[in-house]
Amino acid sequence: MTKKAATGAMVGLALGDALGFPTEFNDVPQILGKFGPWRAMELPVRRGTAYITDDTQMTLAFARGIRTAMERGPLAPRRLARPLREEYVDWYHSPENNRAPGRTCMVACHLLDGDRAWQVASQIGSKGCGANMRVAPIGLVPGLTDEQRSGAAQLQAALTHGHPTGLAASDLTARAVWLLAQGADPTGLVGQLRSYAYENRSRYHEHWLGDLWTRSQDTDATHFIRRGWDECLAVLERLDAVQRTADPEIDPCEYTGDGWIAEEALATGLLCFLLFPDEPLTALRRAACTRGDSDSIAALAGAFAGAHLGADAWPAEWVSAVEHRDELLAFGALWDA
């Protein structure tokens, strides 16, 4: 990856997160009133730092879990689950965990802090965007099989968000990052994701998820996972219908949802990227100026743009200011090598 897609995606995610941090919980008129025209939004820097939210914190926790697991051998369910669980619990207890973390993540991580099976801790009814806001790293790790990438994406989601739509949206987000890092044409991306969803619609990763499905009301594992893929397919169809005709001056949430839930975060983050596939800062600014979960939408848009365009997508002065810059760059260098 000569373009350094991993560096571009990791940094882009954090920059989007930082740009959307002060706009979250505001509607578009409020954001415009506070920050001026959205196309001119600047990175919010205080005391020399552009601060990130729980989105980047948990992305780095996942990245550290992957690195630890792969230092011990090929990526596999038990090898990943243990260090990942430890990273999520460390995040839960960290004094830095004061950036408006999601309730599902907090409840699940509290339950993960012990010796119970992780499936017991998983919040089976939640498909919040916490499932996929942090999944980008697994789309950037070289040398994985499709099964490893998909299984790991769903496992990391399931530790907190056990709803099948959270699992499917996480898998699709990782797939989009991987496709873009490999050089996929953005104009065909939604079609490729829809095909991937259809192909995987009836596949329950028992090897990675164990008996998670039995905690739902579904009659079997296939019925459980299909529910998730079908909700993602519905929003991808909505995205496919508007991606070429959406007015960039209209809040993207109007087209594909506010992003508080996993499938909408994926679709609206993708829409912001696809509106401006070769203008990464414009994509980030559009994502941050939304009525919905602005930091998560912008984090995902940044991951997609960075995977597509590489490290050179981002201005040096923005990169130098972003919180956790050194660790983000270290993971980028590890996976770009």
Image (cartoon, rainbow, N blue to C red):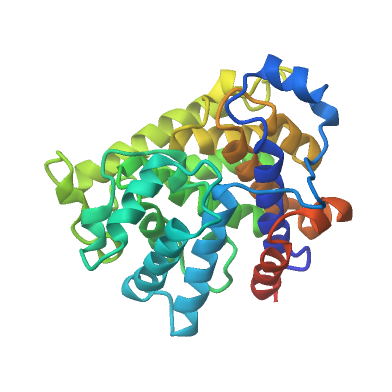
In the drawing, does residue 155 fall left or right of residue 191?
left
Q: Residue at x 60, y 22 (%)?
A: 291
Is residue 313 shown left or right of residue 159? Answer: right
Q: Residue at x 43, y 59 (%)?
A: 93
Please state, as top left, top right, bottom left or bottom right, where the C terminus lies in the image.
Answer: bottom right
Q: Say which residue appears at 61% left-offset and 38% top-offset.
A: 295
Residue 28 lies in what quarter of the image?
top right
Residue 269 occupies quadrant: top right
Q: Can residue 205 be seen in this snapshot?
A: no
**Residue 336 falls in image quadrant:** bottom right
Against 59, residue 30 (above or below) is above
**Labels in figure, total:** 0
* Picture coordinates of residue 334, whole percent (x, y): 66, 75
Residue farthest toward the top in the current orientation of the protein: 29
- Quick check: 194 left or right of 161? right
Q: Is residue 323 visible?
A: yes
If the image is split into quadrants, where does the N terminus sit?
bottom right
Q: Nearer the viewer, residue 194 or 299?
A: 299
* In this view, 69 is above or below 17: below
| Residue 247 spot, x, y in % from top left | 71, 18
The residue closer to the viewer here, 135 or 291, is 291
Residue 94 in the image: state x and y as whole percent.
49, 60
Is 69 left, or right, of 64 in this rendering? left
Residue at the extreme left: 219
Which is more toward the observer, 229 or 166?
166
- Furthest toward the bottom, the residue is 72
Residue depicted at x 51% and y 31%: 259
**Closer to us: 136 or 115:** 115
Q: Is residue 260 above or below residue 79?
A: above
Q: Where residue 326 sits: x, y (%)?
A: 72, 67
